[in-house]
Image (tube, rainbow, N blue to C red):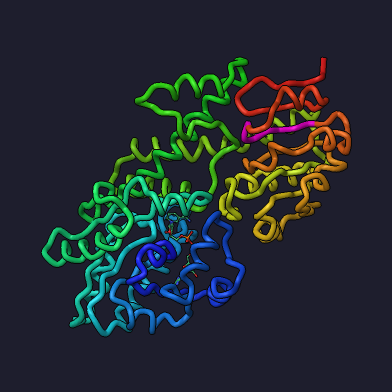
Amino acid sequence: MAMIAYKCPQYRVTIVDINHKRIAEWNSGKLPVYEPGLDEIVKSVKGKNLFFSTEIEKGIKDSDIIFVSVNTPTKSFGVGAGMAADLQYWEKTARQILQNAESPKIIVEKSTLPVKTALAMERILTSNNSRIHFDVLSNPEFLAEGTAIQDLENPDRVLIGSNQTENGLKARDVLVEIYKNWVPSDRIITSDIWSSELSKLVANAFLSQRISSINSISALCEKTDADITTVARAVGFDSRIGNKYLNASVGFGGSCFKKDILNLVYLCLHYGLHEVADYWEGVVKINKYQMERFVLNMLTSMFNTLTGKKISLFGFAFKANTGDTRESPAIFIAKRLVEEKAELVITDPEALQNARIDLKNIDGKVSFIEDPYDAAAGCHAIALVTEWDLYKNLDFEKIYRSMIKPAFIFDGRNILDHNRLFEIGFNIYPIGKPALTHFE
Ligand SMILES: NC(=O)c1ccc[n+]([C@@H]2O[C@H](COP(=O)([O-])OP(=O)(O)OC[C@H]3O[C@@H](n4cnc5c(N)ncnc54)[C@H](O)[C@@H]3O)[C@@H](O)[C@H]2O)c1
């Protein structure tokens, strides 16, 4: 919405949310999320044509177009628990719109939703024999956290799904006009609503499938002394495959990948497509396996016991350049290490506040230190979990001197200079390549 306000000064954009604290933060000088470049854009339009408010009813009444971007977490109860999308926030929003609208509206489904949700929304909006006309569009968001601003400014594509009726196509054109202010026309794709909703789930499924594919091969590389970086490079040179999303790692996180694949799996099961469901569920299984493998590798390499050992987690965000920790592999790893009775020191340049919340009920010794040098001092091992650039350029000689020996580094993102660290004296355990150790 900030990008729309920034690129289209002729539109007035108001963001409304039930969360008063969040809205207060957006209105303050310190934004509630860390995202490179966002601060500048929000500052340049806030109070001009971008406003933040908790007055939802007024927001509905005053607007011609409503983008619904509420959360759609995985259902934790009843039918489809652990897999299907929890649509309660969506339905509440639809009913609120119906109650408060006094003029025709275009409703844009921005949240990621399983196919046919727009139909449900349409049904709610046309119930009550409402005399007001609503058009529902699907416009899934493809931005990635950490690169959101560049993804929004220069998107690979914008996808807009609409009913193929006269009204539906008219509403679609209104949204196309907005994006045309900065997105080239050939990157604005239009379709029917169902294909648009499904495309978002499938895009996330394909992206996470690539990560699980390379991670599954990293396990084989570790057993056979092949090097995953070499394999990924050789494979990625094939122009049909390409080199993106082929970095082996500790696993994927974030609020979307797992949720969206599980939605896809649930959808397939609903339609009796068990083989298809199993295929995609494998992506999530491999991701969990990779995180568990990382912990087991730490355990076996550190002489089969972590009890009382002090381990520093370098990074807690689910990826670099965000403070978001939702579904971060760091959460899984931290919990497992504490089960093994290790003592944890968590460090991260942007995510410590969220890390504290994620681990608040953990039954073990955990501390949070922003400075990575202080975090590593007195530790037996470092587990690098998030690929922050700053970790590449640390003074590892200084870190080595401050740690208990033998000192271990488990590089869960393969971003460090392993040979150099080995020369300093560390025992190095990368992902998908031979360990470098000083043991006989
Ligand atoms: N985070 C991403 O990178 C990303 C990318 C693409 C798509 N999406 C999709 O966008 C949607 C939102 O994701 P998010 O990460 O922003 O979630 P989020 O939980 O951070 O934000 C959702 C917001 O909606 C508000 N809300 C809930 N019910 C409301 C209501 N009835 N009225 C007004 N506000 C209400 C919540 O208070 C919250 O602030 C999800 O469907 C997600 O899959 C997210």
Rendered view: 11 above or below 186: below
Quarter of image, res 86: bottom left
Residue lying at 83% horizontally and 32% vertically, measured from the top left: 397
Give the magenta part as a residue range.
Answer: 408-414
Residue 347: % across, % down: 73, 49
Can you name the residue that lies furthest to the left here?
166
| Image quadrant where one finds the N terminus | bottom left
Residue 418: % across, % down: 70, 26
Q: Nearer the viewer, residue 138 or 149?
A: 149
Residue lying at 70% horizontally and 22% vertically, measured from the top left: 435
Is 40 inside the magenta-drawn segment? no
Rendered view: 318 above or below 401: below
Residue lying at 36% horizontally and 69% vertically, measured from the top left: 9
| Image quadrant where one finds the C terminus | top right
Rendered view: 421 above or below 23: above
Q: Nearer the viewer, residue 166 or 154?
A: 154
Residue lying at 67% horizontally and 43% vertically, measured from the top left: 333
Side of 133 where 97 appears, left or right: right
Side of 343 where 67 appears, left or right: left
Side of 232 where 418 appears, left or right: right
Side of 110 where 346 appears, left or right: right
